Amino acid sequence: MSAILLNGGIIHYEVIGRGRPIIFIHGWVGSWRYWIPALQNSSMSFRSYAVDLWGFGDSARDMGNYNLDKQIELIDRFVLEMGIGRVALVGHGLGALISILFTARAPQIVDRVMAISCPMEFNAVSTRLRTGDPADLSDWLLAKSSTHDPAREDAMKSDSLAIVASFSNPDLMNITNRLFGGTTPTLLVYGQNDPAITVPTLDPLTMPEYTHSIVLEGSGHFPMLDDTARFNRLLTDWTSLETGESPRDLQLKEEWRRRVR
């Protein structure tokens, strides 16, 4: 277990591998732990970090740090404290929002973003998800399988107030302009059957050429757990793109062509 001290509180993280840095940021249910298969997959080529946000996993509980601005600041401080240079971000749900908002504020730091199950606006989030009950959310969104067990177990460590506080600024969650106004290559990934986040209908003709969206058939809110092998293939393809290369090049591969929206 590794940790750093930020604002007087412990922030837990794990890291494996060598190479260019990549940071995995969890969502509203679970912690760093459900990223283990993705961490192992990426660690062959990357220095792979996974961070517990304020109020989740083994990081400190502090109501003053639960809003979106403070969680974004956590990532900013983490990058500085760890001496990380230009970095790839992989965020899920809450972590996806944080990744996009952090990138909008510090585009010079972020090489690329994969945003999984990311709401494009406040109303794209199910009202049930906003209730913040970790037990209810884990039963709702996680399958009863060994693959999903790490997220289910660590969901019980979450402070429900941290979940609720992440929705306290609805305007900050309307990210379309921030997403399409930047130049950082960004891949949006959704599970076709996600009950918590409305999958947006995005027209490739109107999206910037460096932004791309893929919908994974048969997956729900946790594509990385619902179909780990397929998600890790996508992760490998995405990380293999050259710096500045559009994620739209992924659709040239048959594996993803049928899943492009």
Image: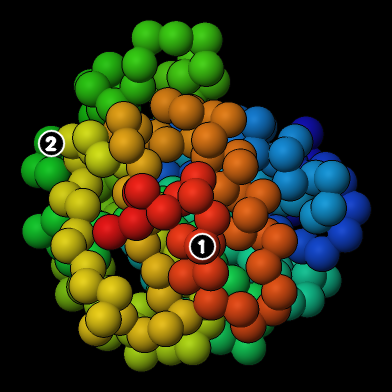
- Residue pointed to by mark 1: 252
Q: Residue at x 61, y 42 (%)?
A: 233
Near-viewer residue (196 or 201): 201
Question: Can the viewer see residue 60?
Answer: no
Near-viewer residue (133 or 5): 133
2 and 1 marks in contact (CB < 8 Å): no
Disc 2 versus disc 1: nearer the observer: 1
- Residue pointed to by mark 2: 128
Near-viewer residue (52 or 150): 150
* Mark 2 vs 1, N-terminal side: 2
Q: Quadrant of the N terminus?
A: top right
Residue 75 image offset from top left, x and y in percent: 58, 65
* Quadrant in the rendering for residue 2: top right
Looking at the rendered structure, the secondary structure element under dot 1 is helix
Q: Residue at x 61, y 78 (%)?
A: 245
Q: Amino acid at mark 1?
A: Leu
Q: Residue at x 66, y 32 (%)?
A: 36
Mark 1: few, some, or many residues within 10 Å (few <14, many ≥20)?
A: few
Question: Can the viewer see residue 211?
Answer: yes
Residue 185 image offset from top left, x and y in percent: 52, 77
* Quadrant in the rendering for residue 81: bottom right
Q: Quadrant of the C terminus?
A: bottom left
Residue 166 image offset from top left, x and y in percent: 30, 55
Residue 230 image offset from top left, x and y in percent: 53, 35
Q: Is residue 130 left or right of residue 44?
A: left
Mark 2: few, some, or many residues within 10 Å (few <14, many ≥20)?
A: few
Near-viewer residue (135 or 245): 245
Q: Amino acid at mark 2?
A: Arg
Q: Is residue 210 left or right of residue 166?
A: right
Q: Is residue 54 left or right of residue 13?
A: left
22 in relation to 156, above or below: below
Q: Residue at x 80, y 45 (%)?
A: 43
